[in-house]
Image (cartoon, helix red, strand yellow):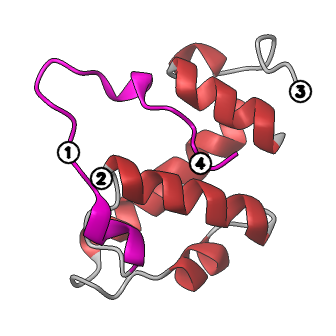
Amino acid sequence: MDVSGYPKVELLATAEKECCSILRLFPEQYLGMKLSLVRAGRTLPKGTFKKRDAQKLCRVDVNKTSKVFEWFCKLGWIPHASTRLNHSHQQPENGQEQQHQQMDFC
């Protein structure tokens, strides 16, 4: 799906646009998910935010939510999530922009 003509697409990084295209999410829908997931992941007690909580929080297909949740965990945007992905997560070096992170869930 080409998301270039949808509202709020200018707020997305290149990788986020790719995510929306692959998962067939509207940019505004993705931004709502991002806000909800990142906020919950940073405010809940460490290790308590799980994928199933993310699926309940977002009113989007559970498979799409799972993919976005896993990607955000890999990027470190949900630092306290309870997931096996955090054990192998590496922070990007200084100077690297997160928008250049590859979408490796596809």
Name of the residue lying farthest toward the right: 1
Q: Is residue 57 above or below residue 14?
A: below
| Kind of residue at badge 2 | Gly
Disc 3, disc 4: CB below 8 Å? Answer: no
Quadrant containing the N terminus in the rendered view:
top right
Corner quadrant of residue 21:
top right
Q: CA distance from mark 1 to mark 4?
A: 24 Å
Q: Is residue 86 above or below residue 2?
A: below
Q: CA distance from mark 1 to mark 2?
A: 7 Å
For the residue labelled by badge 1, is the local secondary structure a helix, a strand or a loop? loop
Q: Is residue 98 magenta?
A: yes
In the image: residue 24, left or right of residue 67 = right
Q: Give the extent of the magenta segment.
A: 83-106
Q: Main secondary structure of the magenta part?
A: loop
Q: Earlier in the sequence, mark 2 or mark 4?
A: 4
Name of the residue lying farthest toward the left: 94
Label 3 or label 1, whichever lies nearer to me, is 1
Q: CA distance from mark 3 to mark 1?
A: 30 Å
Q: CA distance from mark 3 to mark 4?
A: 19 Å
Q: Which mark is residue 32?
A: 4
Disc 1, disc 2: CB below 8 Å? Answer: yes
Residue underneath mark 3:
1
Residue underneath mark 2:
76
